[in-house]
Image: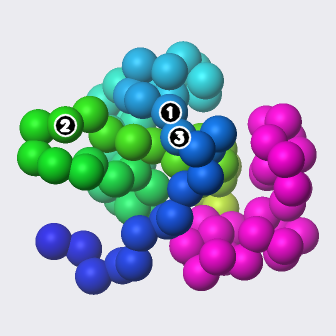
Amino acid sequence: MSTRPPILSLPDEITNLDRAAHQIGRSKDTVRRWCHLYGIAHQPTPGSPLEINRLALEMARYGDVRAIELLREGRRDAPEVKRYAEHIGLPT
């Protein structure tokens, strides 16, 4: 079990596994692996679908661990986080 705090996601940032894989052009297995590796998803209850943070997914795509940690800390005003939000068309 991870001791990392969760990434608190805004409603527009949440996606499911199918859409996440399509968004980044990778397999579902890759997305699942990144969710585990980077802690970018939340599963509200056992057996429920993963809720993947789209912003963190894009950061994981580029291996930008620093930006993921800034997002995890709630530092949405950090330039490293804003850059990804703008890139995928989320409000900053």
Q: Are marks 1 and 3 in contact (CB under 8 Å)?
A: yes
The residue that label 1 is drawn on is 15
Taking 10 as reference, is 45 left or right? left
Look at label 3 and name its amino acid. Ile
- In depth, the one of 77 and 61 nearer the eye is 77
Residue at left offset 89%, top offset 70%: 79
Q: Quadrant of the N terminus?
A: bottom left
Q: Earlier in the sequence, mark 3 or mark 2?
A: 3
The residue that label 2 is drawn on is 48
Q: Quadrant of the C terminus?
A: bottom right
Look at label 2 and name its amino acid. Ser
Q: CA distance from mark 1 to mark 3?
A: 4 Å
Taking 27 as reference, is 71 left or right? right
Residue 70 at x, y percent in the picture: 66, 76
Q: How is the image coloured?
A: rainbow
- In depth, the one of 61 and 70 nearer the eye is 70
Image quadrant in which you'd find residue 48: top left
